[in-house]
Image (cartoon, rainbow, N blue to C red):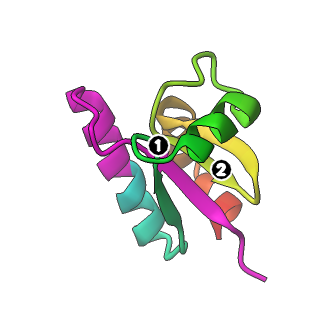
Amino acid sequence: MSKKVVLYTSSVAGNVFVNKNTTQIKTWLLAFKAPFTEVDCSTDDAARQFLQDNSKATNTRVLPQLFVDGKYLGDYAVLEELVEAGELKALVV
């Protein structure tokens, strides 16, 4: 059974790092052949509320954030550590 992977992003992020980090996470997921859904928090009030209620990030407004099967997996910094440790693929596939 495949995992439900959801990447929360923002299409209106003016921060270069947010856009770069989002692109990098998508690249990892595609490389792992992990199907995922991207949710744009800038246009989805329910998604913003979900992050506020379920994110374990220090700042729930920091994007991008990745959830697997409805549970917080991490923001870019956490995911980068998982990639470097060779652990992210097993968590998303």
Quadrant containing the N terminus in the rendered view = bottom right
Q: Which residues are magenta?
A: 1-24
Farthest residue to the top: give it. 58
Please name the residue shown 53% across and 68% down the image.
36
Helix or strand or loop: what does disc 2 sit on? strand
Q: Residues within 10 Å of mark 1 (few under 14, many from 20)?
A: many
Helix or strand or loop: what does disc 1 sit on? loop
Location of residue 15 by image quarter: top left
Query: Mark 1 — residue?
Result: 41
Q: Earlier in the sequence, mark 2 or mark 1?
A: 1
Q: Which mark is residue 67?
A: 2
Identify residue type, mark 2: Phe
Task: Confirm whether residue 24 shows in the render.
Answer: yes
How many dots with numbers?
A: 2
Find residue 10 and report its horizontal and vertical position in percent: 37, 41
Task: Confirm whether residue 89 shows in the render.
Answer: no
Identify residue type, mark 1: Cys
